[in-house]
Image (tube, rainbow, N blue to C red):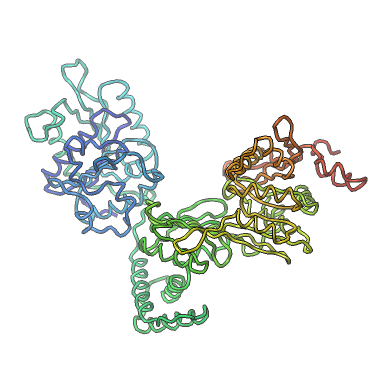
Amino acid sequence: MEKPGEKVSVFVFTSFQGGVGKSTIAYKFAKHYQKRTGKRGVLLEYNRLSPSFTVESLNLKDRLKSSFMDFMISNWSGFREEDLQRFFTEVDGLFPIPFTGIRAQETLYPYFNFIDSDSIPPMERLLNVISKTDLFLVIDLPLSFSPFPIFMLKNADVLFYIYTNQSPSPSFASRFEWEWKRLSDNKENLYFLKNLNDPDSGKSALGFFKNETVLPIGNLFSDSSQDDPLERALSDLVIRVSGLTKIPKKADEKIETRLVPKSQQALWDYQRLVRTEVVGSMEKKFGLTDEDLKRNVEKSIENAFQKHPPPTINGCDVKAETRKFLSDEILGLGPLEEFIRDPEVDEIMVNGPNKIFIEKRGKLQLTGKVFNNSDHVKAVIDRILMPVGRTVNERTPFVDARLVDGSRAHAIIPPLSLTGPMITIRKFARIPITLEDLTCQLGTLTPQVGEFLKLCVKLRKNIIVSGGASSGKTTLLNVLSTFISPTERVISIEDSAELKLNLENLGRLEARQQGTEAKNQVTIRDLVRNALRMRPDRIIVGECRGDEALDMLQAMNTGHDGSLTTLHANSTRDALARLETMVLMAGVDLPLRAIREQIASSVNIVIQTARLSDGSRKLIELAEIIGIEDLNILVKPVFCFEKKWINEEGRVFGEIIPTGYIPSFIRSMPGEIGESYSKLFIPKQVTI
């Protein structure tokens, strides 16, 4: 909240148009304001991956330390007042901060996935530091009604919209005034600047806006001559606004910020104090069991409580919160442990130390949890990798692993990751999902589809489950495996063990990545070949993604009927095309017809899954492969998902319906058995 009578300090210059002198006016205004008030200021060009006017016109490229993009990908959450001088360059009382491209040979192309809203949290931090150091901020803001520009418009103490006499600039200015009336009730802080006005052009210098200043044509690159008409006009404008006070924001217009409340900060400070005490007091012993380590940590925490009594914070059990924090920090995965325990969280995504996203009920959301720094994230990665005997370092900067509960984890660190160490954890249900869950609770399948899939597994049909990322392929594969007879021997092969197969005669194989240790890499293809010597009735490959597809097809075609695998594809046709590509990756010189004949004779059923826009996972197509004709693999859809409509909340409504085609192996069943199963494939409109 601003104090009554506090002087304005945030000036935003914006326009729908380029070429109206916005960057020039913003720079000159900042110089005049700095000269009149004696304050230091920040000039931020939010030029969004475009060349900087200030850097180029004043030849500052070799003098500036950091850009706003550098600030965004740094550990900005710990940015303090004293860091401003260290991180940014001060030039004659101004800190010029372009968005990017301040170094020689530095590309303007974004070197990370830039999202407009990602600029808001670091900008909030920078605004907080600027207000504490009594600086002023001038921001050159190209206008679009996206999250960051709207955030800055609402945080502006004074807002300048710049336009010219040339059509359609005046109509654009009128449009902005209309839009601003819808966004804000504070009209007093909006000023219109008609720039490049030439009295000799025959056009009136008078404007039609309430708060308007006319800026005459002047020397765009001079900032010293007070005889210049543009300089005089800007000097008068500074005098006009420098005496203004901030307009308090209404309670219902309060903009959400991430500034930490004092009570929360006190809790964090106490937790860090106790953590230092606990870690420093623990004895470094090897060979401790998990229970012994847990008891030692709990004892150390109690001793730390006695040495440093917890502060009193209203509405907070400091001891309980600190005990939970330390247990997660020392024994678990730190800030991620809460989400690991939450059964509703399906996926956890760490984008550097300051951003932790989760997927909950099919929707992504940013959490309030953060790591202390990049080293803290790296320590959690090492804790994940230690039980599975893997490492990550500059030589092998990415790794796949699994957690104790079977969840799949992927980690990647700099220099490959420019946003700091990144972790992605795909959680799996602790209680295995059943066919009834997919049909009744989740709505992924219908009972008819479930009955047909059960029959396919019982009859030892070779099945491929395809779909996009996080579309439910592995879950469906787990469900299909529950229908395998306990008398059969099954060998499962995975890159990182994540399948939960409840089978009696099961052999599980896991590939080994190439690491820094003196160990040879063992690929999925190596394991498929070895599995053929282990007398399997069925082979289950967690995912085909390379040359192992050829060996998988060979296994399906040589007495290992009923094998299962998954692959990434967008449709059943794409799945078969990708299977061809993966076979070619094996380096075997086979003609295309031979490959397609191999696929047509090996694969019986292709199941296509998808994650819909509302986050739900559905079976969208189930097809039978019936042979090959004129070099084309013949595919007959058996069931397909028909989308009906999407409601206002974004929920997708539809149903899985039979196409009317009866699979060939059902038609070949004798007598009443074939007739009873044929009822599964009759479309609703045919039934009486």
Q: Quadrant of the N terminus?
A: bottom left
Estimate the x, y position of residue 62 in percent, counting from the top left.
19, 43
- Give the image location of residue 514, x and y in percent: 49, 58
Q: Is residue 551 above or below residue 302?
A: above
Q: On the rendered structure, is 583 left or right of 630?
A: left
Q: Is residue 217 left or right of residue 489?
A: left
Between 643 and 8, the one lying in front of the other is: 643
Where residue 203 appears, x then y in whole percent? 22, 17
Percent of width and height locating residue 19:
26, 28
Tell me if 139 is positioned left or right of 548 in this view.
left
- Viewer can see residue 8: no
Residue at x-position 27% and y-position 46%:
67
- Single out the residue that lies furthest toward the top: 202
Query: Which part of the image, by quadrant, shows the C terminus?
Result: top right
Q: Is residue 448 visible?
A: yes
**Which residue is rendered at x = 78% and y = 50% of the image?**
456
Compared to residue 316, the image places residue 585 above or below, namely above
Front residue of 540 and 52: 540
**Residue most toward the front?**
589
Q: Determine the residue positioned at 60% across, 56% down.
A: 526
Q: Quadrant of residue 200?
A: top left
Q: How many marks?
A: 0
Camera-side residue: 509 or 220? 509
